[in-house]
Image (cartoon, rainbow, N blue to C red):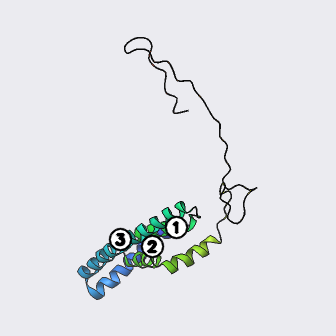
């Protein structure tokens, strides 16, 4: 049912709003306004997207939880998509997603419905300030193959780096 609203109702609402705005300010101004909002919106998305990427990289460098920067980045990308779609309703929705306090509010609301099943952290050592990730490894030592002189003998076996 959500696809019905997105692909049927939303385009009809956009068309209705464009016709109404066009009847007030004219068709040329309406088209110009739609193009202008798309260009300005994309410039803002580019700037905020770079800031979200820097925040994500900082969270990795400082070993912080990257969920918030990832969510901000996803909402900024959604805003960019809404701003690219021609129409005033999607432009308003996209512009609202570019306001950081509104994104925070939306993330808190959506966060109530998200459950983290397994984040990969050790259950035994989990606690305040825990920085340990449990892992298993196996040391594999291969003897290097004998290299015959050039042009003599069989070809070398594969290096084994893909194992």
Element assignment for label 2: helix
On the rendered structure, is 121 left or right of 92? Answer: right
Where is residue 149, by image quadrant?
top left
Q: Nearer the viewer, residue 140 or 48?
A: 140
Q: Position of residue 87 (x, y in %)?
A: 37, 75
Assign the C terminus to one quadrant of the image: top right
Q: Single out the residue that lies furthest toward the left.
A: 28
Where's residue 105, x and y in %?
56, 78
Secondary element at tag 3:
helix
Q: Quadrant of residue 80?
A: bottom left
Is 149 placed above or below 36 here?
above
Which-is-in-front pick, marks 1 and 3? Answer: 1
- Mark number, residue 69: 1
Q: Residue furthest right?
A: 124
Q: Give the farthest residue toward the top.
A: 152
Are discs 1 and 3 less than 8 Å apart at CB?
no
Question: Disc number at residue 42?
Answer: 3
Q: How far apart, in angstroms, are the residues tagged by discs 1 and 2?
A: 29 Å
Specify the quadrant that holds the N terminus.
bottom right
Q: Answer with left or right where residue 66 lies relative to residue 39.
A: right
Ranked by sequence position, the earlier of labels 1 and 3 is 3
Residue at image x 67%, y 43%? 136
Q: Decide which of 118, 11 is in the foreground and name it.
A: 118
Q: Residue at x 67, y 55 (%)?
A: 132
């Amino acid at each position: 049912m959500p696809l019905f609203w997105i692909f049927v109702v939303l385009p009809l609402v956009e068309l209705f709003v464009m016709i109404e705005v066009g009847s007030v300010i004219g068709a040329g101004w309406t088209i110009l306004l739609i193009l202008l909002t798309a260009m300005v919106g994309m410039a803002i998305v580019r700037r905020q997207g770079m800031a979200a990427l820097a925040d994500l990289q900082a969270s990795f460098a400082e070993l912080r939880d990257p969920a918030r920067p990832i969510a901000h980045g996803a909402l900024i990308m959604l805003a960019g998509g809404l701003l690219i779609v021609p129409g005033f309703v999607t432009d308003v929705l996209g512009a609202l997603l570019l306001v950081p306090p509104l994104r925070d509010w939306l993330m808190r609301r959506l966060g109530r419905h998200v459950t983290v099943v397994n984040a990969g952290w050790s259950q035994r050592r989990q606690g305040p300030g825990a920085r340990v990730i449990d892992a298993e490894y196996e040391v594999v030592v291969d003897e290097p193959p004998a290299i015959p002189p050039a042009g003599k003998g069989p070809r070398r076996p594969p290096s084994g780096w893909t194992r």
